[in-house]
Image (tube, rainbow, N blue to C red):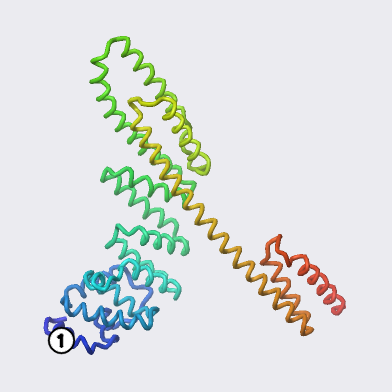
C-alpha cells in the first residue's frame, strides 16, 4: 500500500469499517487451511511495510472493539495476529498479549477443522516468541492430536541439538527428556542424555581437580594420602549409585536423589560436592516436572470419570422417563448406556442392572 493510501486510512480512523480493516491486513482472502507459515509471514511483513504506526493503531482499535462483541471471529482474530506481529506496540498499548491471542486463534482454528492452519499460526508464533514455552506446548498438543508425534520428536531433537551447539547442556536435556516422554523406545536419546550429563560432570570434575592440585601440593604426605583416600572412596560411592532409568522414571528418579542426599549428608564437604550438589538440584527439577505431569494426567482422568458419571446419570434418568411412559425398548437402551458409562461402585448400578435384566427378559418374551 502506498504512503498516500496509508495516510488515508489514518485520517479516517474514526470511521473505519472492520471489514475494510480485515481486508487490508489479510488481502481479502478467506481462511484457507492449506495456507503455509510462509504465507502468514508474508502477510505480516506486508503489514509492517504498508501501514505506519498511526494507521496500525487505528486498525488495532477497530479490531479490538469488534472482537469484544464477537470474540470468536476467525478472520478478525487472524487480522489482529498479523497486525500484532507486524506492529507489536499496537497490542502492547492495549495490554493485549500476542501469545494469548495467537493461542486462542489456533484453538478456534483447530476446533473448526483447520488443523494445518492452526499449526502454522503456532509455528510462526514460536519462531517470533521463542521465550513463550506455552506456545510450544500448544503446538505439541496439536501435533499429538493429529498423530504427528514423529515430527514433534524431530522438532524437539533439533532444539536439543541447537542447545548443545550453543553449549547449553542444561537447556538441551529437558528437550531430550520430552522426546522420551513421547517415545520410550528412543534409547539413542537416553544415551545422549547420559553422555551430556557425563560431559557436564567431567567438565566440573576437571575444574575441581585443578583446584585440588594446588591445595594438595601444600599438604604433607600423610594428609595427602588421607585426603586422596577419602576422595576416592566417596567418588566410588557416587559412581555406584544406580543411574536414572528412562524406562522407570517413577522409581529411579527418586532412588537416585535419595542416594545422593544420603551421600551429601554422610560425608559433608569433599572436592566433588559441587558436581553432586548440582546433579541433586537438577534431579529436584526433574522430579518436580515429573510430578506435575502426573498431576495433569490424574486431573485429566478425574475429569473423564466425572463426564462418564454424568453421562451415566443422564442415561439413567432418561431410562426412568421412558419406563414411566411404558416405552420399554427405549428404556432398555438408556439403562444399558448408563451401565456402559458408570463405574463399578456407582450407587445406582445394582438397581439399573436389575432393571436391565427385567427389560431383557420382557423383550425376549415378546420376541418369541
Q: Report x, y in % for residue 324.
A: 77, 82
Q: Residue at x 78, y 80 (%)?
A: 328
Above or below, 53 against 144 in this view is below
Q: How many C-alpha atoms fall within 10 Å of the one at disc 1: few (<14), some, or many (≥20)?
A: some
- In the image: residue 291, left or right of residue 90: right
Residue 152, quarter of picture: bottom left
Tell me where residue 170 appears, x and y as whole percent: 33, 44
User: Where is the C terminus found, in terms of image quarters?
Assistant: bottom right
Residue that protrudes farthest toward the left in the picture: 4
State which quadrant residue 189 falls in: top left
Q: Identify the residue at image location x=47%, y=32%.
A: 259
Disc 1: which residue = 11
Q: Is residue 129 left or right of residue 319?
A: left
Give how far across and how far down residue 322 sits, in percent.
74, 81
**Left or right placement of residue 44 versus residue 368 in this view:** left
Quadrant (top left/top right/bottom left/bottom right) for the N terminus = bottom left
Q: Is residue 193 above or below residue 264?
A: below
Question: In this picture, is 148 found above or below 118?
Answer: above
Mark 1: which secondary structure?
helix
Number of labels in the image equals 1
Could you say which is closer to the camera, residue 140 or residue 348?
A: 348
Rendering quarter of residue 107: bottom left
Q: Farthest bottom residue?
A: 15
- Tell me the residue at 41%/73% (across/down): 109
In front here: 150 or 350?
A: 350
Question: Residue placed at 64% from the left, 71% from the top?
Answer: 311
Q: Position of residue 343 (x, y in %)?
A: 68, 62
Amino acid at each position: 500500500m502506498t504512503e498516500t493510501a496509508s495516510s488515508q486510512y489514518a485520517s479516517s480512523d474514526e470511521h473505519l469499517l472492520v471489514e475494510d480493516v480485515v481486508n487490508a491486513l489479510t488481502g481479502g482472502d478467506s481462511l484457507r487451511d492449506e495456507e503455509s507459515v510462509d504465507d502468514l509471514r508474508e502477510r505480516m511483513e506486508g503489514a509492517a511495510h504498508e501501514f505506519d504506526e498511526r494507521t496500525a493503531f487505528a486498525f488495532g482499535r477497530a479490531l479490538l472493539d469488534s472482537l469484544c462483541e464477537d470474540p470468536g471471529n476467525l478472520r478478525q482474530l487472524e487480522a489482529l495476529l498479523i497486525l500484532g506481529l507486524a506492529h507489536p506496540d499496537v497490542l502492547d498499548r492495549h495490554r493485549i498479549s500476542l501469545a494469548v491471542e495467537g493461542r486462542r486463534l489456533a484453538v478456534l482454528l483447530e476446533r473448526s477443522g483447520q488443523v494445518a492452519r492452526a499449526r502454522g499460526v503456532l509455528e510462526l508464533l514460536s519462531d517470533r516468541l521463542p521465550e513463550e514455552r506455552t506456545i510450544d506446548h500448544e503446538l505439541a498438543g496439536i501435533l499429538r492430536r493429529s498423530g504427528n508425534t514423529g515430527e514433534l520428536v524431530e522438532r524437539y531433537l533439533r532444539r536439543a541439538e541447537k542447545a548443545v551447539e550453543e553449549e547449553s547442556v542444561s537447556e538441551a536435556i529437558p528437550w531430550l527428556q520430552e522426546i522420551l516422554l513421547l517415545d520410550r523406545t528412543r534409547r539413542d536419546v537416553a544415551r545422549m542424555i547420559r553422555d551430556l550429563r557425563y560431559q557436564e560432570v567431567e567438565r566440573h570434575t576437571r575444574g575441581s581437580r585443578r583446584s585440588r592440585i594446588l591445595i594438595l601440593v601444600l599438604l604433607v604426605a600423610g594428609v595427602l594420602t588421607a585426603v586422596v583416600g577419602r576422595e576416592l572412596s566417596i567418588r566410588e560411592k557416587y559412581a555406584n549409585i544406580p543411574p536414572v532409568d528412562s524406562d522407570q522414571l517413577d522409581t529411579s528418579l527418586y532412588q537416585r536423589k535419595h542416594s545422593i542426599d544420603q551421600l551429601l549428608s554422610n560425608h559433608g564437604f569433599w572436592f566433588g560436592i559441587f558436581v553432586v550438589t548440582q546433579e541433586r538440584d537438577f534431579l529436584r527439577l526433574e522430579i518436580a516436572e515429573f510430578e506435575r505431569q502426573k498431576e495433569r494426567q490424574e486431573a485429566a482422568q478425574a475429569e473423564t470419570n466425572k463426564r462418564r458419571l454424568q453421562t451415566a446419570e443422564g442415561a439413567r434418568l432418561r431410562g426412568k422417563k421412558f419406563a414411566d411412559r411404558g416405552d420399554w425398548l427405549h428404556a432398555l437402551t438408556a439403562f444399558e448406556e448408563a451401565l456402559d458409562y458408570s463405574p463399578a461402585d456407582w450407587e445406582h448400578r445394582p438397581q439399573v442392572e436389575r432393571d436391565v435384566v427385567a427389560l431383557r427378559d420382557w423383550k425376549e418374551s415378546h420376541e418369541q
